Amino acid sequence: MIAVFGSVSGSPGVSVWSVLTAALWATSDSAPERVVVEADLDGGVMSARYQLDASTDSLIAEAGRWQRRSRVDMTQFAVKVADGAWLVPGPKTPESAGSLWRTSNGVSSIAAMAAVDPRVWLFDVGRASQDGMLGPLFTQAAVSMLFVRGAAEELARARRRVTLLKSTGAQVMVAVTGACDHPRGEVIEFLGTRHVQFLPDDGRLVEDSRRVWDGRKGRRREIWTAGAGFASAISDVLEYSPRGVMRVAGVR
């Protein structure tokens, strides 16, 4: 199943929170694995940030060969960052990222595969929209998560995007980062979706996301608590999304 992580205008934290969300997901015998795929058309940061090689090209090359509902072996494409969590970094430059995702049927193949896979695929799409090159990810998504700053003008832009994202059939969530210009209740009502999360905008988020590699979660309790709550909220929405967990019941 697919969860798309995007932003209104390059809001800070999309890539970091996708990694934190995957790593801090509550684990159990029935919990799905999570796979973070960096699909930012403006170029990726994860390979440099975590000292990894970009590997989405290998993922795209193989996606079309996978049979519907087959289980994907991620070890050849992804790095394990935590229990049940994988990371697939993208290329660094806009030119290489655009060229990669223009590969014949690349986006459509990955979207079709990830939509029916029992794992949760978290696609970091940056500022991409549902009517652009990455459109198949949005139309197959169970959840579309929109990141936005709490400034009034940013919230106004987010409200318009929420309406458009709802037209794809996905459950729409909004993550508001940092301080808000208005009370939280008013923000939720204004955005037009009850699925709104408020996240801290911390200058040490990148450093904190690196801690998933060595398990030092207890040292930044506020961030880890926020991340775990964020992951739990997404999991809850997936439970009743028409394209979420129930869609792949019996395939785990």
Image: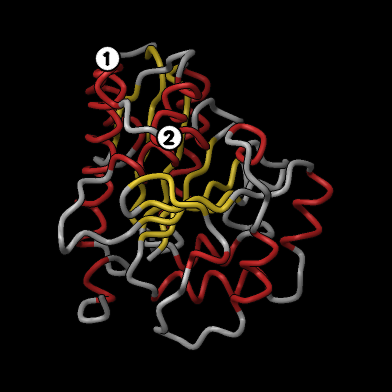
Which of 151/53 is in front?
Answer: 53
Which of 78/142 is in front?
Answer: 78
Q: Residue furthest right?
A: 95
x 45%, y 74%: residue: 72
Mark earlier in primary sequence (1, 2): 2
- Where in the figure is residue 110, as x and y percent of width and height? 56, 70
x 54%, y 27%: residue: 11
With respect to residue 60, does 202 lie above or below? above
Given the image, on which type of amino acid does mark 2 rest? Answer: Trp
Which is in the foreground here, disc 1 or disc 2?
A: 2
- Where in the figure is residue 203, as x and y percent of width and height? 49, 13
Q: How far is mark 1 from mark 2, CA to CA?
A: 23 Å
**Occupied quadrant, residue 230:** top left
Specify the quadrant that holds the N terminus. bottom left
**Occupied quadrant, residue 24:** top left
The answer to whether residue 165 of the structure is visible from this angle is no
What residue is pinned by disc 2?
Answer: 17
Specify the quadrant that holds the C terminus. bottom left
Taking the image as shown, residue 95 lies to the left or right of residue 38, namely right
Within 10 Å of the Cα at label 1, are there few (<14), some (14-19), or many (20+) other Cα atoms?
Answer: few
Within 10 Å of the Cα at label 2, are there few (<14), some (14-19), or many (20+) other Cα atoms?
Answer: many
With respect to residue 110, does 122 lie above or below? above
x 48%, y 33%: residue: 16
Q: Residue furthest left?
A: 29
* Residue 2, numbered circle: none
What residue is pinned by disc 1?
Answer: 183
- Where in the figure is residue 208, as x and y percent of width and height? 42, 23
Given the image, on which type of amino acid does mark 1 rest? Answer: Pro
Task: Tell me the SS state at disc 1.
Answer: loop
